[in-house]
Amino acid sequence: MEEYEEIEPKPFPRWVTVPLGIVFTPFTFLCVIGSAIISVAPNVPPTLLTISLGSLFLAGSLWVFYLSLRLLFVSPKGKSKFMSPLGLKVIALVFAAIPIISIILGTFWEKPIIHSIMTIAYIGIVLRLWGVANHRRENA
């Protein structure tokens, strides 16, 4: 009975998955944008065939984009399929950059009260994600 059990392949090391994710993620994101544009192209008459093919291409490209993001953010050796501590810290840095970019672009000063509240929320998200990442790193 044991000889018929399915053998799990060894996961790729992290130094392989991160460069693959860096290469595949922008390309697959462009595929998502392209397939979304195909779905709503103004010069193509909306028939059942064009809508179904466009939806099929969009669903497939979204799925491949999700897989390429998993290459970047999910640790292949981890027991859970959630994001790795490094992935959580990268997402936290993105949330930290949002208020800084709004100040640089000048959109912060259009509605300073709302943007101040949003900045407090972003800082809370950053601190929480950073704390979860540190907790996962300690328990790994």
Image (cartoon, rainbow, N blue to C red):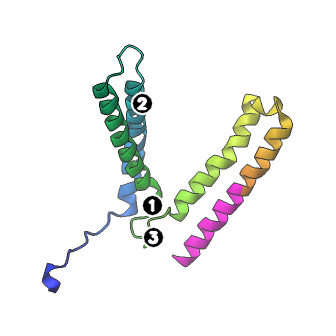
The residue drawn where x is 42% and y is 30% is 36
Up/down of 19 relative to 57, above or below = below
Residue that numbered label 1 is attached to: 74
Q: Describe residue 48's horizontal placement relative to residue 98 as left or right.
A: left
In terms of sequence position, does the residue under pointer 3 or pointer 1 come before the other?
A: 1
Select label 3 or label 2 by which is in front.
2
**What type of secondary structure mainly makes up the magenta span?**
helix
Q: CA distance from mark 1 to mark 2?
A: 26 Å
Q: Residue at x 32, y 37 (%)?
A: 56
Residue at left 32%, top 66%? 11
Q: Secondary structure at mark 2?
A: helix
Query: Relative to residue 66, is residue 44 depicted above or below?
Result: above
User: What is the quadrant of residue 105 in the picture?
Assistant: top right
Instruction: Say which residue label 2 marks.
Output: 36
Mark toward the viewer: 1 or 2: 2
Q: Secondary structure at mark 1?
A: loop
| 98 part of magenta stretch | no
x, y (%) of residue 90?
57, 53
Q: Secondary structure at mark 3?
A: loop
Task: Report how far apart the C-alphas of labels 3 and 1 lie in the structure.
Answer: 9 Å
Type of residue at label 2? Ala
- Most distant residue in the bottom direction: 1
Mark 2 neighbour class, 10 Å CA radius: few under 14, some 14 to 19, many 20 or more: some
Rendered image quadrant of residue 4: bottom left
- Which residue type carries mark 1? Val
Return the disc, 3 or 2, that comes first in the chain's sequence.
2
Mark 2 and mark 1 in contact (Cβ < 8 Å)? no
Residue carrying label 3: 80
Q: Which residues are magenta?
A: 125-140
In this picture, residue 37 sits left or right of residue 3: right
